[in-house]
Image (cartoon, coloured by chain):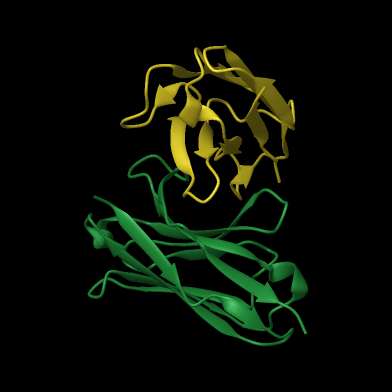
Chain colours: A yellow, B green
């Protein structure tokens, strides 16, 4: 099973700042990596799939990059609704696995 | 608009059973693979099971294999998870999830979740 690690565990930023979240895989997942946003009390939402493709309706301030074992989710300018937990997920190897999450909170 | 509404969660004793249901609307349910994903308190997300669009294929996480059964009723736009021999470590919020078409195991729509608590 592929293990995903995310860093940092918590990111404290102000609205308008840039957020950079990392996800590292225990072995190569090629580009088969997704990012999800999970706000408290809401359903998780797919943001990015195949490392860099935005899902339908996702604002352009969200971008993903990387391949192999190292991936990055960037939020170019944080909006109030972006403060949430972000998870990465791989589908390269069975079973699909998720990282432990990065919490982006308000500084 | 896509809606996935889970029900059936609750408190159950170790060794007991529970059946979760998910009512789907806003899309052609019979076209999509569906999954259950869970999140234990304070923990990350864990994929539990999937079922193909016509129920031909199912698969389970090792942690639930032999105890959980996924099923669906396309006529009723409903997904189910029968959970038997429940353990404390099955305590979690269970999400009904729609898989993205044509892209493998990416999860495009999620319900709000239903809480299952296994405790004596």
Residue B51: percent from the left, percent from the top? Answer: 43, 64
Q: How many marks?
A: 0
Relative to B84, A3 lies left or right: right
Kindly identify the residue that appears in the image at 54 percent across and 75 percent down.
B9
Residue B6: percent from the left, percent from the top? Answer: 43, 67
Up-down relation of residue A16 to residue A11 (above or below): above
Question: Which of A7 and A2 lies nearest the eye of the viewer?
Answer: A7
Q: Quadrant of residue B90?
A: bottom right
Is residue A70 at least partly visible in the picture?
no
Q: Quadrant of residue B102?
A: top left
Relative to B50, B84 lies left or right: right
Kindly identify the residue that appears in the image at 63 percent across and 29 percent down.
A104
Is residue B43 at least partly visible in the picture?
yes
Relative to B74, B55 lies left or right: right
Quarter holding the C terminus of chain B is: bottom right
Residue B23: percent from the left, percent from the top? Answer: 33, 68
Kindly identify the residue that appears in the image at 33 percent across and 45 percent down.
B101
Residue B60: percent from the left, percent from the top? Answer: 58, 64
Question: Which of B64 and A58 lies nearest the eye of the viewer?
Answer: A58
Relative to A98, B104 lies left or right: left
Q: Quadrant of residue B34?
A: bottom left
Up-down relation of residue B84 to residue A60 (above or below): below
Kindly identify the residue that appears in the image at 39 percent across and 39 percent down.
B103
């Amino acid at each position: 099973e592929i293990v995903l690690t995310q860093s940092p565990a918590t990111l404290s930023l102000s609205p308008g700042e840039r957020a950079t979240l990392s996800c590292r895989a225990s072995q190569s997942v090629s580009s088969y990596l997704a990012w999800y946003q999970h706000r408290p009390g809401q359903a998780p939402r797919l943001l990015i799939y195949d490392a860099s493709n935005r899902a339908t309706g996702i604002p352009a301030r969200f971008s993903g990059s990387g391949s192999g074992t190292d991936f990055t989710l960037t939020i170019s300018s944080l909006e109030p609704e972006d403060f949430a937990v972000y998870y990465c997920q791989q589908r390269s190897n069975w079973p699909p696995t998720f990282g432990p999450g990065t919490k982006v909170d308000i500084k | 608009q896509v809606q996935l509404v889970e029900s059936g969660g609750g408190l159950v004793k170790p060794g007991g059973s529970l059946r979760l249901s998910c009512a789907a609307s806003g899309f052609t349910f019979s076209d999509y693979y569906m999954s259950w994903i869970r999140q234990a308190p304070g923990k990350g997300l864990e994929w539990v099971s999937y079922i193909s669009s016509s129920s031909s294929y199912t698969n389970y996480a090792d942690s639930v294999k032999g105890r959980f059964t996924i099923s669906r009723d396309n006529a009723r736009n409903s997904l189910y998870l029968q959970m038997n021999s429940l353990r404390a470590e099955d305590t979690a919020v269970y999400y009904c999830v729609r898989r993205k078409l044509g892209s493998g195991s990416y999860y495009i729509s999620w319900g709000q979740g239903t809480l299952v608590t296994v405790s004596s």
